[in-house]
Image (cartoon, rainbow, N blue to C red):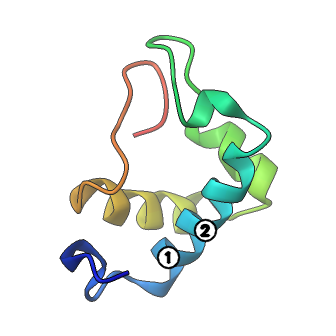
Amino acid sequence: MGDRRWILLPLAARAVWLQLTDLADVMPELRHPVSGAAVDENELCRLLAASADEFHNALTSLVERQIVEPVPGGTG
């Protein structure tokens, strides 16, 4: 994690990133989303048993630092 984007990234965002990478092993659509058919934020909250507000804040941090990208019709 020598990438400068990770500096001062909230711990919740780091945890979400690790959980998403684990989840992407069984859900290839997370790594290669199709516009209009991407996994949405509510579905990810359900799969990770996460609080919607906390998940949204963590995801926002990841998007702001360009670690993940929003997909039209999906998360972000």
Residue 66: x, y in percent? 25, 54
Residue at far top of view: 36
Amino acid beneath label 2: Leu
Characterize the local packing of mark 2: few (<14), some (14-19) or many (20 or more) Cα atoms within 10 angstroms. few
Amino acid beneath label 1: Arg
Q: What residue is at 67 percent from the left and 31 percent from the top?
A: 28
For label 1, the residue is: 14
- The quadrant where residue 50 appears: bottom right
Residue 64: x, y in percent? 23, 58
* Numbered label attached to residue 18: 2
Element at label 2: helix
Residue 47: x, y in percent? 79, 49
- The quadrant where residue 20 appears: bottom right
Q: What residue is at 78 percent from the left and 48 percent from the top?
A: 46
Query: Horizontal placement of 62 versus 23: left or right?
Result: left
36 vs 23: above or below: above
- The quadrant where residue 8 appears: bottom left
User: On the rendered image, what quadrant is the N terminus found in?
Assistant: bottom left
Q: What residue is at 62 percent from the left and 27 percent from the top?
A: 29
